[in-house]
Image (cartoon, grey):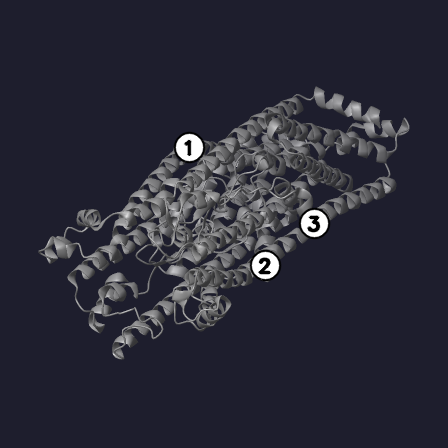
Amino acid sequence: MINIFYNEWRCFLRNKLFIFFTSFFIILLIVVTYFAIIQNNKQIQSQNEAHNHIRSQWDEIDSTNAHSAAHFGTYAFKSNTILNSLDEGINSVTGVVLRLEGHKQNDVAFSEISQSLEISKFGKLKPSLLFQFIIPLFLIFLSFNSYTSEIASGRLKLLIIQGDSLLKIVFAKIVTILSLSFLLLFLSIFIQYTFNFSSLSFDEILRLVIFFFAYIIYYFIIITLTILLSILFKKSISSLSTMIIVWLLWTVFLPKTIGNFTESISPLPTRFELKSDMKEDRSKGIDGHNPSDERRYQLEKETLEKYNVDSLSQLPINFSGILLQADEEYGNKVWDKHFGNVYSILKEQKRNYQLSGLINPFASIQSLSTGSCGTDLIHHLDFLSKAEIYRRYFVKKLNNEYTFVSTKGENAYLSDNVFFKSINDFNYSTPNFSSVLYYYLYDIIFLFSWILFLIFFVILKSRKLII
Amino acid sequence: MNLNIFLYEAIHFTRSKAKLYSYLFFMSICMLSIFNAYKISNKQTQTILNINEQKEIENQKVLDWFDKSNKGPDDKSWINVEDPYWAIRSTSTYVVKEPSPLMPLGIGQSTQFGFYKKVNRWSSTYDDDIVEEISNYERLINGNIDFSFLIIFLLPVLIIIMTYNINGLEKDFSFHKLISIQNNQVKLWVFTRLIFYLILVLFSVNFLILTVGFFNSGISNIKSVLNLILLSNLYIILFFVVFYFLNTNGKSSSSIAFKMISVWLLFCVIIPGSVHQYVSFQYPVNYMTDFLDVNRKRTYDIFKLDNSNLYTKLLDIHPEISLNKDSLEINLDNKKIRRSISSIVNQMNVDAANEIERQNEEKNRLIRFTYIFNPVSYVQNMWNSCTSTDYDSYKKFRIKLKESIQLRNELLVLEIWKEQKVDKESYQEYLKVLN
């Protein structure tokens, strides 16, 4: 088998067209990966500057009312991971700025895609675009006649006479073409590793490894299927045209149709419906600025009993702060109910889409690629959840201060700068891949199923084939 | 042109299962895409209907207060709708962008922008409640089955499937010399065969565009429909011209297919992708810190100003208010000035939003500049423009929104300063002005 492998490579290297395209892809990958890293680092720097700018404003707050500071709020900026330069996933369509303030949860705004005219339907020219769309096509063109040309030239018979089995020959061809994709992938990962050597954590290295092997498996599927089709059709052109149609179905048509289908089987509420429902639920609760609410009365009674006083003016604390925190907690419950539902629908849609990996391995590779780079829906929802947890911490801290701050004297209700500075900053970190791995089990299972299925068919066809 | 060759190609097409089924499959997904876009358009229309209904209910509630001589809701004693400040605050106003009647022919960027916004005196054109509808971001990345996408990106592939073996198959089987003997001009023979597919494709595309255009909007959008036809036809012809040269010069069908796919990849994927990456490098995602500053820090700074400073700022924006009172002391009325602050903040928001628009425009200028070598993005944006689903259409929506916010603040300030008691008629007048 090793001899066939070497021989295949020797043949490849004698082919000028192969040399040209391989060189082209190597140069393209180096350039694309390098520029993607530079662009991503620029983006990370820009995000850090925005973050520091906003935090410095917070740190400079003078003596002020803590509730007023809760309205002043802060911002969470969605950060790019280092691996965003490999596959930016959904980052161009999600917003990047989230305002965190008292009383309400805001939507993440200012997506990149809404800041300009439309440019590319397939995304930026990042390594993922090459890995998902272009390299598979290149592999198809390398594989479609690798078997049929052997029959046409009579070399296949010669090899079999010399003692090689057909199965061995077919697998040697698959491994040869796969080794090329291995080289291209390795090159890109190596550049990624070299340029980010100092900032890569163990988790990111693990993600890179998963990214690498996921694509190797996908390429194995592409190459094996193309060769299998050429065995089945016995004509190069039939296997080529069929494989191009399969490629189109996998990469362009099925992701769109299945995406639409998953959305129609688990529909999301419109923003208007969601807001109306939340408003209605919220209005049933305590409105921090509405003194006639029944719950407010109950809370007032409980507080007076707790402090053993008869009126609010006798309280050693600021009752408004308690009221605001109670309203906040009620609002959080409403948010958890409605957005919890939206998040679970989104996850259900993702799961349903992942199931399409059974017929479309592209869905699995896409999911694993964005998942390993931390740029998919799961990571985005994680960012939103952590930002909301921070918002709750932030507002509670301010409400507590507002409750227990002195209510008398010249500085009544005012908190000083030391207090505001003491509030922790929001620093988002991507979850460890091992903690989210279970979201990608379907993808891993389907990719392996495809491998087993194809190997089984190649073995079956090779045994039945009469040369 | 030889009619026999043309007719032979028609027969070949109907007998070639791969070509015929590919064509029929493509036409089916075109219809599916139109149906899908209808659904999106109808969903937007339904949301707008709900908004209007909600708006009517809210405004009617205030009108009922006037009828019953109530000054506001029972549980909010501080509200007095006879006061212009509360009356204007109680008007429910939305600015919406109605879905274009041609949206079924191109969803464009419509899923990336919000299409309605409730306006209050603190609103701005970049508020976070004006973002796109709740949707699955992973689906947004993959995109919708959209008619414009099918024509711009998939139709060339259909053309490849139908034409890759013209003059290539003959070379594969080495009877191309026979063709040369039978037809003096091989190029004309290739051209005639290609013309059949060109006519087939143009007829199919034009039929769908015209049907949807007339069915959905009659002749009111005839100009846009004709523009779409012109644009799509020129685009398709362009691909046929390129493929003609590949067919005439190809050495075998696999070589022609490879070259055709490479052309498609180059123009539809690689060039737009490279431009996208370059533009992103030149203009990274805007975190809009200037706008955030206005929205937060500078707004809070405004609140810290004393009445005299605020009044000066208000006079700059609304010089009319000085005419209503003759004494500066009265003008420095704390309540009126504090209630007018939103107008000063709005002016700052407008300035910050204009700066964002300017930055976005710079980015767009760079994108337009690349149209010279990036024709697919040009066609895509032109198409979106015809279906009113492009960036500029949503920019117009933001301008409309800006005017509405400005109008509300202007009305608020002037009416506060007039100090007139509001009755049902004047409230209805407010509604007319603000809607």
Parent chain of label 1: B
Circle 1 crowding by C-alpha within 10 Å: few under 14, some 14–19, many from 20: some
Of the image marks 3 and 2, the number of the one nearer the N terminus: 2
In the image, are marks 1 and 2 on the same chain?
A: no
* Residue type of the residue flagged with mark 1: Thr
Instruction: Answer whether residue A197 is visible to the viewer in this image.
Output: yes
* Residue matched to label 1: B370
* Residue matched to label 2: A345
User: Where residue B221 sits: x, y (%)?
Assistant: 35, 55
The residue shown at (23%, 70%) is B82
The residue shown at (72%, 39%) is A217
Q: Quadrant of residue A176?
A: top right
Parent chain of label 3: A
Quick one: A111 or B416, which is closer to the camera? B416
* Residue type of the residue flagged with mark 3: Tyr
Circle 3 crowding by C-alpha within 10 Å: few under 14, some 14–19, many from 20: few
Q: CA distance from mark 1 to mark 2?
A: 40 Å
Q: CA distance from mark 3 to mark 2?
A: 17 Å
* Residue matched to label 3: A438
Circle 2 crowding by C-alpha within 10 Å: few under 14, some 14–19, many from 20: some
Image check: A365 left or right of B420? right
